[in-house]
Amino acid sequence: MAIVVLGGGPAGATAALLLAKWGHEVQLITRPPVSRGLAVSLPPSCGKLFDAIGIADAIERTGFPRSTGNTVWWGSGDPRVEMFANGAYGWQVDVDALATVILREAITAGVAVEESTVRDQPDGFVLDCTGRAGVIARATRLRQLPEGPRTVALVGVWWRDGGWPVPDDSHTLIESYGDGWIWSVPSAPGLRHISAMVDPQRSELTRGGSSADVYRDEIAKTRVFSAMTADASMIEGPRGFDASPYRASAYAGERWLLVGDAGSFVDPLSSAGVKKALASAWLAAVAVHTAEKRPSMRADAFEFFSAREHEIEQHLSRESRSFLAAAAESHTRPFWDERADDAGDRLAENEDIRRALDQLRSRENWQPVVSPSMSIQPRPLIRGHEIVREPHVVSTDYPRGVRYVRAIDMVALVELAPVTRQVADLYESYVQRMGSAPLPDFLFAVATAVARGWLVAE
Ligand SMILES: Cc1cc2nc3c(=O)[nH]c(=O)nc-3n(C[C@H](O)[C@H](O)[C@H](O)COP(=O)(O)OP(=O)(O)OC[C@H]3O[C@@H](n4cnc5c(N)ncnc54)[C@H](O)[C@@H]3O)c2cc1C
């Protein structure tokens, strides 16, 4: 029976393409295509995913505008011009145009596409890729809306003769102000999508105000965008998008997986939605491929997918909250107070690792002992297009196990550690067994093993 993919956005098109390429029969059902008019920024790291999915050439041929970074007005100061590391380029894309490019590749790979609006779960195994609509996510009542403020994005398309007066017009522009933030993505020379992220409860939106008035009022509250749009014209919009975060209590069931935005949505400030959707689709395709090829691995594969989706959502949400905390330092208004969080746990663990690294550097001799609180046990991981069980370092805090830290194999590291007296010896033994490894990554991995209590230095 064919695998059914619901939704033809970036996630659905990608999952369908990969499964068809790996030899499966795939049917994709999606609403008739309409452009939502949503321009989004993709970081340079999406390039690796384009390669892994096999769409890098198709993306290149489409000629989406490239970008060199972000320019940010966080609070009242001067602009912070942030260039992507190593001179890399990101992409500025219409999200539906991106989905169309991937969908075309999927059709070429043999995916059967049906245009219709799905209301109920079809027969067979289903990937729910219907984004915020979340056909299966809602029907199964797995969607969770965290308590807290909601965000609506009002998006207008603007034209300005002679381009925009900013340090680099390829950049995504972000300005925070007391009641929200403005986000602008260039879509063509002279054209910019400008989004106002507002709290519907704190604006006139829920009191019957017109979205056009609210949108103009919000822009008028800003310093930079009010000046920049004064001699520009809005040629489309504003259109409203619900941009409130949500997650799911589980991402896999007997007959379905929740993929991309169908499973979770993180604050657009992270610029990670599409990357998350593509990575989720890739992992969903790997999980389904594994289940079809090796039924005995089915439960492991789906549990692995669900756990990863949960971890990624938690990680990105924490990251967004720490961006929002940075802005909250500049604004003492409810919009920011309600969204800020100081990501304290992660900082504490980084601090433990840094301290362990300092201790290792200051010791001549080192007799590491493997802690009885850790063990080596088989856990699922991805090899090629499949999920397999391989040894991991397992402890109470890491029950799902860890195999790699910065590409250093932790199982090999803890196996070799007890027979060495110095970190330099351990490095040499590791390289002999595993091949070359960057020394800073290796030291970080050893420090991580110490900080997490897997190795105890005597
Ligand atoms: C205001 C805003 C700004 C954003 N900015 C960025 C950004 O800068 N960078 C970034 O990476 N991400 C950004 N995002 C997030 C990004 O757009 C999403 O994460 C991404 O589109 C998710 O892809 P998806 O395929 O999971 O879902 P979607 O793109 O939502 O695709 C869902 C698909 O399912 C179809 N569908 C829905 N319901 C049904 C149904 N009942 N039957 C059949 N088909 C159905 C839809 O037609 C669509 O084709 C932003 C989002 C918003 C709202």
Image: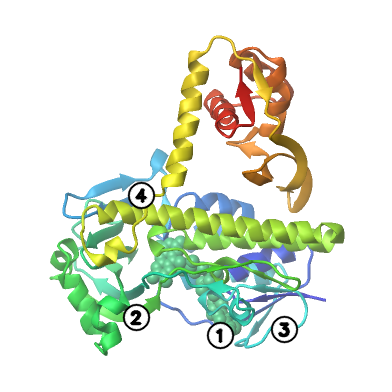
> Please, what is the three-letter code of the amino acid marked with disc 2?
Arg
Quarter holding residue 22? bottom right
Circle 2 packing at 10 Å, graded few (<14), some (14-19), many (20+), is some
SS under mark 1: loop
Circle 1 packing at 10 Å, graded few (<14), some (14-19), many (20+), is few
Q: Which residue is mark 4?
A: 68
- Cβ–Cβ below 8 Å for labels 2 and 1? no
Mark 3 / mark 4, whichever is N-terminal:
4
Q: Residue at x 20, y 77 (%)?
A: 216
Mark 4 / mark 1, whichever is N-terminal:
1
| Label of residue 122 in the image | 3
| Label of residue 32 in the image | 1
> Please, what is the three-letter code of the amino acid marked with disc 3?
Pro
| Label of residue 239 in the image | 2
Residue placed most toward the observer, 105 or 264 = 264
Q: Is residue 207 left or right of residue 301?
A: left
Q: Is residue 62 left or right of residue 112?
A: left
Mark 2 / mark 1, whichever is N-terminal:
1
How far, Cα to Cα, is label 3 from label 4? 43 Å
Q: Residue at x 36, y 72 (%)?
A: 151
**Badge nearest the viewer, 2 or 1:** 2
